[in-house]
Each structure stands twice: as C-alpha cells, then as structure tokens.
Amino acid sequence: MMMSLRKQKNLIAQAIRATNPLNRTTPWYSAAITCLAMSITPSGVLAQDGQDTERSSRSKQPIEEVTVTAQKIEESIQDVPIAVSALSGDNMDALKIERGEELLRAVPNVNFSKSNFSTYNFSIRGVGTKAVSAATDPAVAVSFNNAPLIRNRLFEQEFFDVQRVEVLRGPQGTLYGRNATAGVVNMLPVMPGDALDSEIKVEIGNYNSKRTSGMFNLPMGDTLALRLSGAMTKRDGFDTNTYTGNDVNDRDLYSTRAIFEWKPADNFSANLIWQHFEEDDKRSRTGKQLCTTDPGISKIGDTEVPENYRGFFSQGCLPGSIYSDEAYGTTNAKGLAFVVAPQALLFGYYPVMKEFLPNPYANAEQSRDLREIATSFDPVFRAENDLVQLNFSWELSDTLTFFSQSTYAKDDYYSSQDYNRYVSDAIFSDSTEFGMDPGPTPDGVYTDPQLGPSEGILAVDISRSDNKQWSQEFRLQTSFDGPWNFSVGANYLDFKTQDDYFVFNNMFTLIAEHVYNGVYDPESGLGSVNCTDPQSKEGFQDCMYVDYNSLANIDEEGHNYFLSRNLVETRSWALFGEAYWQITDDVKLTTGLRYTDDRKRSTPVPSQLLLGTETNNDTGEIVPGSASGGLIYKGYPEDDEVTQSWKEYTGRAVLDWRTDTPFTDETMFYLSFAHGYKGGGTNPPRADIDPNVVQYQPLDETFEPEFVNAIEIGTKNVLLDGSLTLNANAFYYDYSDYQVSQIVDRISLNENFDAESMGLELELAWQLTDSTRLDMNMGYLKTRIADGEESIDVMNRTQGHEDWLVVRPSLQVPSNCIAPKDVVEATFAIDYPLMLWALCDTTGRWGSFTPEIESDQYFDWLLSEPYNPITDAPNGARGFAADLSGNELPNAPRFTLNLGMEHTIPIEDWDLTLRADYYRQSESYARVYNTDYDRLKAWSNLNASVSLSNPNSELYMQLYVKNIFDDAPITDLFTNSDDSGLTTNVFTLEPRIVGFSISKGF
C-alpha cells in the first residue's frame, strides 16, 4: 500500500529504535531544545521527498536528498545550478505554510503583499508585479504542474495534497511557459500511485475554525489509477465592523482535485487533472483605511481663508507616517467636488446640506486597532476557479522523450466593500422644510437606487474579473550517454480577461438626478426626470442616464456611477530550448535560448461618471454636454482596439563545476548570466470627455516591456558526512523599464523606471544530531532606482516649493492640481471659490486667466500678467516631479531571515516533535518615492508546533500556534485617488491562530 512520506520516515525511525535501545534514552538537551522558540521554515534544501538512511544516536543523520524538476528533469536540488528552494507537502504541513503568501517564511529575499484590486504582488529579489493593469504580465510566473497561470487562486486557496512547491529565483524564460523576470513558483500535486491508499484530516481552532482535507488513491487495474483529494475551510472573521456589529474577513472555501493516470505501456503515460476552487464569504479585499487629516490652509499670503473654504486647499490626507497616531484620522472631504457641487449648484432652490460646505467625516473616529473597522457595508467576496490539464509523455526511443501539456483555466472573481471606509455624519437637510413635496432629501434622507436611504454619504465599490486561459506546450527531451543533451519545445498561450471596477456613491446619483436631470415644479419643488432621450430632455442641464436598478441588477449603462472596464487578450507563442554540454566529468555548460512573439489586444472602454449630452436647438443634433462635457449620455461604448506586439530573444548561460575540497563532501560552483523579458501593455482610458470642457493633461497610453540582465555566482555544498547542506549565492540585476503604477485621473497609470538590484543569499540545513535539526536562510538585498528617473508624487505635488499650492478640481476633473500662490490668492480674494476650479480644468469652463484659453469669463484682469496652467505650471499643473535617483524599489527589504529548529523525542511507539519557526524582514518602502509616508517598519513572525505521530497506526496529531505574539505589522499600503481624498488602504498579517489537527491514514 502506498504510504505518505511522513509515514515512511516514521516507520524507519520505529524500526531503528527497535534495534537500537540507546535511542530509547532521551538526551539531556531535549528539555532545553523544547524551550527554543526561534526558528524558521526550511529553505529550498529542506523539502522532504523521502528518507532512506537510518538514524543512529551516535552519528549524525544525513540530510535527505531533495529531488526537483527545476530544469524539467528530475535531479537532486544540489545538482541544479539555479537558486531554487523546494518544500514538500509534509514540510509545509509541519511549518504551517498553508497558502502561497506564506512562502516568504521559507525562501530568502521573497516578499508578498495583496493589491487593492483582484491581484497580488509576489516579489523575488525586489522584483514583483507593482503594475496594476489588466494588461500586465506577472513578473513571477505562478505555475500549476509546470503550466503558467496568468490569473490564479494558488495564493488564496489553501495547499492540499501537494507533492512539492518549487521557487526558482531569477529570470526563468527559457524552459518555462511564460517569460518571468523575477522567478517561478511551481506547485506540483501528488500524482496517483499503484496502491490503495487514503487519508483524512480534521482540524479545529480559534475563530471557530473548522478544516477538513483528505485524499483517496485507487488503482484501477494494471494501467489506470485515480486520485481524489479535497480540502474545506470555514472560520469566523478576523476583523470586527463596529458599525454593523459583524465579524468580517472570514473564510468559507473548498477545493477539489481529481487525477486520472493511464500507463498502457512502458514507454507511454498520460494523466488528466481537474481542479476546482470556490469561495463565498465576507473576506475583505483590503485592510483598514488610514489618513493623516489635511486641514487645509488658513491663510494665503495676506488673505484669510474662512474655515468652510479651507477644503479647497486640502488634498484630504497628508503624507504622514502610517504609524503615527495622526494616521488614524479621516479624510477632509470639505473640498471634494461631489460635496461642493450639489450645494453650490442647487443653492438657489434649497440648501441640500445642513451646514454650508461640511466635512462629512468630521465626527468619524477610528480605532487604533488595525483589526477593527467602522463601515456602513460589510464586504462580500466570491471567487471560482476551474482548471483542466492533459499531460502525456512518450518515449520515442531509449534516449528521446516527447512531452505534451494542454491546460485550460477559468477564473471568476467578485469583491465588494465599503469604499469610503468611514461612516459619514448626517449631513442632508430636510427638503420638506423648504416647501418641497417631497424634494430630494425628505426628513434629511436621500435614497440612492443602488445603496438605499441614508442621512449621510454612502459609497461601495465592486472589483470584478472574468478570465479564461488556454495553453499548449510540446517538448522533446534527450538522455544521451554522451556529453551532449538538449531540451527543445514550443508553446502557445491565449488569455482573455475582463476587469471591471465600479464605485457607487449616493452623492453621484444626487448630482445626476438633481443637478443635471433636475426639474422644478412650483407646487412640489425640486424633482428629477430620468433622461432616456437627449432630444426630449426636461432637466436643468445635460441629459444623463441614471440606472435605477438595484446593486445586484444594474444594467451597467448608468452614468451615476464610476465604471472602469478593461478588456485585454494576450496571444503568445514561443520556441525555446536548452543544450547541456558535459565538458569534463566535473564541468558542464548549459545554454538556453527562447524566442517569444507576444501580441496584446486591448479594447479601451472610457469611464462616463457624471457625463451627459445635450441637443443643439438649431440643428437638432446631439452634441457634447456644455456643462459636463460628455460625449454620450448612456452606456459605455468601446473605443478602437489597441494592438501591441513584441518579438524578443531571451536566454541564459550557466557554467557549473563540481570539485572536491578538504572540508566538504560535495561542492559545486556555478556562474550564470540570464536575459529576461516581460511584456508591456496599455494604461486604462480616462473619461471620454469634450476637451473644450475639460482638457486632460497628456499621459502615456501604453507602458513599455521590462528587461533584465542578471548575473549570479553560487555554490552548493554537502558537509559533515551529509549532515549539513550549505548553499550560497550572490547576484546582480540590471533592470530596464521596471513597471510601477499609481492612481492618476481615476486610472492605474503604469510608469517605467530603470533600476538595479544586488544581493546575497544563504540556505542551510543541519542535522545536528539524530533527532535535532537546524534550518536557516538569510537574504541581503540592495535595490536602487537609476539616476535621472522621476515621477509625480500625488501625495506631494509641490515637492517643497512654497510658492505653489495644491488646489482641488471641479466635478469632472479627478486629480488635484497646483497653482502659484499669488494667482490663488488673487483668485480667492474675489469671494467666488468656484473660480478656483478654473486653475485645474485648463479650459474656459469655469473661467480663464489668459486669452490663450477661450472662455465666457476672463479673470486675467486679476493678475499682473496672464496665467496659463498648461504652459506656466510644471507638467501642465499636475505638479513637480520627484527625483527618484538612488531610491529603493518598493517591497524590497534589505534583510530577510528565517530560522527553524526541530527536535524529536521518541516515546515508546510514538514520536513527539517540537518545532519553532522565526521570520524577520527589515524595513522597506511601499512606493518608489521612499518618503516617511512610504516607510514600512521591520516586522517579525514566530510560530511553534508540537506534533505526535504513530507510524504503525498512521496517526498524526499536531497542536500549533501561528503569530504567537499576535502582531499586526503593516506589510504594504495602497494610495487611493485624489478625488477620494488620498486615503491609504493598509494590509497586515493574520492574527494569532491556535489550532489542533488529527490525521489518519488507511
């Protein structure tokens, strides 16, 4: 009967103890080691794929040989001239590595963080996926059974029935199915065996956690076998919404897998894999929202700024440290255009709000606990993923094997949560008190068709993604006896994605209904008539369609909410190969080359928030709205497709040398050079708006591909009769056009920067005695952005220039701008604050300060000389660019450390294993600007477990604690848009988790 690796090891241990009574004596140091709580996950050399050597109390046990397929052939990890780490399923179970994000505790110079939308950033050696775009390729290729998956749930679902996870560091474009500039994470499932076997595992823990997993292996004759496996998790939320009183950030998910394997002949085998993942719970996409409140300015030159008007000069949140007490404030929303517009433009009918220009979040208070939020809505999270894979291998001869792999994957994702992340004050006035029946806000309540009734501001977002992928790979592999061998192949990938991001805000609908579609009746007062035909419009201003369907049934045509839709199709084919020349018995040269033809087709779908049209009274034609600048009044039409293509050669060369030294059993040195590439893409389109109403400043519509040249020198060693493995390497990366994004004009603007990265890595596994093992890996990383690189920091647009001020824009302009202080003072002195909007619009919609910009209102008489924001302000009034020269790359801590210690105490027929794991990373930065706001403090994590196993009965029990000190370090942050007040979403670790599991094999 097929046994698990754990059972095999335990049976061997039992047999040895039965023949060696000395092993029944617990050594003196057992108690001391039991108290140790400093350790870490084992590094790549710690994966346990089998153990064939016997234990002896008087000699050190050799470290088990780890087999990997990093070069698409099975070989010892110590023979692979690549920086690679590997963890078996038993390893990860012992170390409580349950998801991909926890691999950072096992691999040097690895980091992980969630993103604000539907993706994540897994970075290796400072290189990850910091570009937020549907057209972005991942820098780290995440693969299932060697098939790269552009969108996947491998970092959200929990590992189950895993044979091994391999993490390859450095460019891996030659053999793997997609170019990967940073590395590869490859998850390999356990394949069917030839013996009847099964296992079930149950677990309970705090937060009412309940887990179940199991597998069933069924041989079906001599040629066919079936393996079924699955896992299910359900627990309460880690966080508390103090406003609704509900626990949030819970999990309710399950995964299943079925593998059929067929081997009708010695030279042919095939397998079919189906895997399904599903989740439906209240998991939060982001953590708490922080803000160091920007109160605005009280004086401009000699001109006093009244309290109610200071919001026009507040960006909402200041770039203060996220660790200060002030960071737990709320955004200053006084000057947000959607707060100002209904008051200013409906003032002639009635005061919409109780106070003039209020801050809706003035009385909102934030808990200092990162696991407590106060929001009007609880999050909703749903995800579903299916994967089907067909593999076969055919030995054409004794020395030539043909491989085929066909993979189809489908991924659907839906996440909704409170957008503002604060609870608004009651701000609406009672419209019935002003002679209306009922008016927009009867009893001080406004009712939004999607969000329902409220006395204050409500906002909810939806992040939704639909992805399909099909890939095919063919490969020929040789196994000649001579000095030459090779592996050649071809692959094709077709990936389609649609990413939708919605923001619903009841202020948006209020403006659409009553500022644009508003009508006035002398008897009932202010009302609204939805515009469904611009030629029969009845409202005050532009015709603007309002979607009156519920949130669950929107028709996706309304202009009363924000929608960013991204349609991208990637088609790629490649030819690749590697040649292996055994120059001498000790020296081998590996050379690899890949030709990639990438083609991306993006379909821009501009956003249409609060945009409408009107009818020309003379011609009857539908023309752009003179008030909003909209080109259409309803729906989200697609623009012309944008096609990009790249044809690139990448490759690598590795020279490795095996030698004998006086102090090692085995030693290998290697030197490698690799050239990597990752495709570029398109930036999402901005609003489709008449440039005569709002003139956007130029932004790049596309971003460039990434390139990296990587040099690495390393050594792999076995010492002390095989009881110690010690691997080390040093690397240098020269990076061109690294992709990084930030939110600008309501889109994810991706920029390119040149950079370099260098570092050292050390991995050690030491069997100190027969029953005690020490694991360690360390990483040192130094990254540097190239001289001359610059970017506009939305958190600090003036860059210390005291003669310039940040100014809030009008309704259709999403980003703040800057203007000279003397111009702002002269404008503000007129006592008509909406004139300030003319400083950001760069059109004559709200007035002009120069004859160069046509307008019905000229304010150039206010100034000593004309002022044109487009030409007289830096970067068209977007702000001064920050110098990035010498800055560190984001999410690239200088030091990472993993320590792990394991001690086994034999007790009769049982093994009692004590393990502790310690991880620490030094401080890093969340953005390329490296300001105090960007700084992420160093953090550490300590886990421990006690395991008891009986190999005779295949019984295994484990009590574990993760995050022993219940720390909540901030692991990353995301800066929201200008028109959201530049708030900051932060991400943190899971809290302390205590669990007990028991598994039984049959």
Image (cartoon, rainbow, N blue to C red):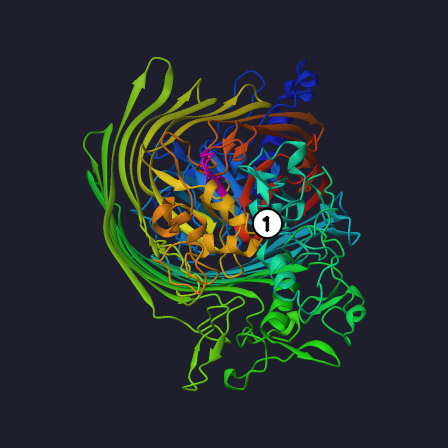
Residue 304 in the image: above or below residue 537:
above
Residue 307 in the image: above or below residue 109:
below
Q: Position of residue 990 (x, y in %)?
A: 65, 41
Q: Amino acid at mark 1?
A: Glu
Res. 929 image quadrant: top left
In this rendered view, identify the residue nearer to me: 673 or 246. 246
The residue range painted magenta reads 796-805
In this rendered view, identify the residue nearer to me: 579 or 819. 819
Residue 109 in the image: above or below residue 795:
above
Q: Residues within 10 Å of mark 1 (few under 14, many from 20)?
A: some
Q: Is residue 266 visible?
A: yes
Is residue 13 shown left or right of residue 788? right
Residue 804 in the magenta stretch? The answer is yes
Q: Position of residue 114 (x, y in %)?
A: 54, 46
In this rendered view, identify the residue nearer to me: 626 or 234. 626
Is residue 475 shown left or right of residue 254? left
